[in-house]
Image (cartoon, rainbow, N blue to C red):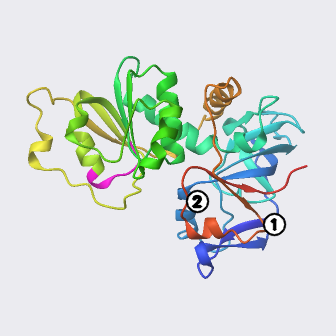
Amino acid sequence: MHALVADPSAVGGFCLADVPPPRPGDSEALVEVAFASVNPTDLHRAGHAPPGTVLGYDAAGTVARAAADGSGPAVGTRVTGLAMSGTWAEFAAIPTSQLAVVPDGMDTDAAATLPLAGVSALRALRAVGPLLGRRLLITGATGAVGGFAVQLAAVAGASEIIATARNPVAFPRLRELGATVAVDSVTAELGLVHGVVDNVGGPALAQAFRLTAAGGTVVSVGRASGQDTVLAADDLLGDWGRSGRTVRTFFLPEEGTELGSDISFLLGLANQGRLHPTIDHREELRGDLATLRSGQWRGKAILRIHVR
């Protein structure tokens, strides 16, 4: 089958290759991939994985072979799901615990955007704690995780959602998604917030921590800035209403493996029109992959593998 594999000598760190199809384990379904999602972590892995590793974490398509243990959907069912590798290919083996059935009427390409980015946003918000009636800050909100976090926070009833984006051109779109305030940086003028989902790291995370109210949590999901976060001694004081603040690390593979129910929940919201997956860039598996190789895009990118 055709697949994109790690290749340190190629531009972007990957190339198109012919590889054997995967051999699913007993609790894995063999999925004929129609669309594969593209995430920054995919490109990071391309630069660190052994040469020849099939890349990609999440995908949507059709079950070509049901799991041998009887779990999961039947042959011919449209699904989307998350694997730890191997979805940038014509076929992928995906654990049935991390698969969900795509509702009738929902586009397969939209479903492909949800597993990694959507579940990351969902679980990061759960880590923040209760949102109903509370002020939330989401940094790097133009990324896929940030965009889903804004929408899910609105669904959860946050009283105010502050979203950051480097380019003010993105502000109207963020407001459409549910942000009540859109800004280009984190400043003291924003006031105290009850929780933070941080996709930027560096100085933005430090400033967000300074704005976090007593008992609040900053969830560090991404480090798009590539900069170190430096906290001053005073930032760690717990007096005058600053006690109990925490910075929480986040890595989805260690947030629990039973992701199928979360993916189903997100698919349901999307099918009801309460969550809006947006595809900003499309690439063909056998195309020049210029956008992917550059590593530069905003929002969500997907790969079109093949469509029946």
- Identify the magenta region: 198-203
Query: Hey, which quadrant is residue 118 in on the image?
Result: top right
Q: Answer with left or right where residue 288 lies relative to residue 145.
A: right
Q: In this view, does 15 lie above or below 128?
A: below
| Amino acid tagged 1 | His
Which residue bears the numbered disc 1?
A: 2
Q: Is residue 256 visible?
A: no
- Distance from Cα at disc 1 to Cα at disc 2: 17 Å
The verdict on residue 108 being magenta is: no
Among numbered discs 1 and 2, the one appearing first in the sequence? 1
Secondary structure of the residue carrying tag 2 is helix
Question: Which dot marks residue 263?
Answer: none
Q: Which residue is drawn at 59% across and 44% down?
A: 116
Q: Which residue is drawn at 61% across and 25% down?
A: 274
Q: Residue furthest top?
A: 133
Q: Residue furthest bottom?
A: 9
Contact between marks 1 and 2 (CB within 8 A): the answer is no
